[in-house]
């Protein structure tokens, strides 16, 4: 399976991070991002970055959140906390792993009609709804990475195989032996 890796643009010093995962470093205590996994959909040095937190299910589906969607194809789409920006807005996202050719296809910010079409066709796409998103201005994410607030990782099928904190622990554990130890660290160190 092909995994996206952070790539340096041609002739540029800035990382191109779209298609990567940002894992909150275990020392990051900001409640907006503590132990989060962010799927970056867009990134540029000039415009900043945009993504959604993929490991914070709200234990609701769209039909529970918006009664107008009950009875529609979108009623059973799971709802996640996408981030602190625009937390009153819903973003529909769909992705698909293709093990045969080793690709990951991502549709970010699709409209309701496209999401319904994907669901009706049984296309194998994972369709999720996110309340809000995560965003960074020009140079902000790069600075946070330099300050070790984030750990970069390649895409992982664990996005679909696990939920919540288990996603963060699993992917972070695969980064390095040091990160494996930190991922298992309890919140209350006296419990260690």
Image (cartoon, rainbow, N blue to C red):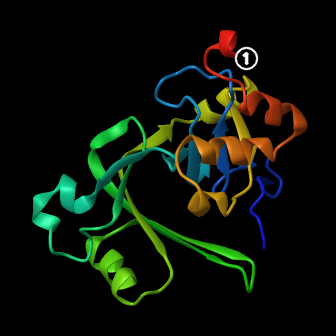
Q: Position of residue 24 (x, y in %)?
A: 63, 33
**Can you give x and y, in whole percent of width and height, for residue 148 in the image?**
74, 26
User: Where does residue 11 sit, x and y in percent of width and height?
Assistant: 83, 53
Determine which quarter of the picture holds residue 46: top right
Q: Is residue 87 left or right of residue 82?
A: left
Residue 99's quadrant in the figure? bottom right
Q: Residue furthest top?
A: 190
Q: Residue 187's spot in the image, x, y percent?
A: 61, 20
Residue nearest the observer in this picture, 90 or 67 = 67
On the question of residue 80 being in view, the answer is yes
Q: Which residue is mark 1?
A: 192
Q: Using the image, determine if residue 20 lies above or below residue 88.
A: below
Viewer-nearest residue: 129 or 60: 60
Element type at marker 1? loop
Q: Residue furthest right?
A: 177
**Which residue lies at the image location 31% right of the left edge and 70% below the top edge?**
111
Please identify the residue farthest to the front as the structure is shown: 191
184 on left or right of 75? right
Residue at left 65%, top 28%? 144
Work out whether residue 37 or residue 134 is closer to the camera in this orientation and state it.
Answer: 37
Give the quadrant of the C terminus.
top right
The N terminus: image quadrant = bottom right
Answer whether residue 45 is visible to the viewer in this image.
Answer: no
The image shows a total of numbered marks equal to: 1
Residue 23 higher or lower than 90, as above or below: above
Query: Pointer 1: residues within 10 angstroms few (<14), some, or many (20+)?
Result: few
Which of the 4 image quarters holds residue 191? Answer: top right
Seen as rendered, the residue at the extreme left is 68
Which residue is located at x 55 percent, y 45 percent?
49
């Amino acid at each position: 399976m092909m995994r996206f890796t952070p790539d340096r643009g041609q002739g540029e010093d800035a990382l191109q991070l779209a298609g990567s995962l940002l894992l909150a470093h275990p020392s990051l205590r900001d409640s907006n991002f503590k132990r989060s996994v962010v799927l970056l959909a867009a990134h540029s040095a000039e415009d900043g970055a945009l993504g959604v937190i993929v490991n914070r299910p709200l234990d609701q589906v769209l039909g529970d959140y918006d009664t107008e969607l009950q009875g529609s194809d979108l009623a059973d789409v799971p709802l996640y906390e996408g981030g602190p920006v625009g937390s009153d807005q819903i973003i529909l996202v769909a992705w698909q792993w293709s093990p045969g050719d080793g690709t990951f296809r991502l549709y970010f910010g699709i409209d309701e009609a496209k999401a319904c079409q994907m669901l009706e066709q049984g296309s194998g796409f994972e369709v999720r709804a996110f309340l809000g998103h995560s965003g960074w201005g020009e140079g902000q994410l790069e600075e946070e990475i330099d300050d070790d607030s984030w750990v970069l990782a390649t895409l992982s099928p664990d996005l679909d195989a696990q939920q919540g904190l288990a996603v963060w622990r699993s992917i972070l554990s695969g980064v390095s032996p040091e990160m494996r130890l930190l991922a298992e660290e309890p919140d209350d160190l006296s419990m260690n």
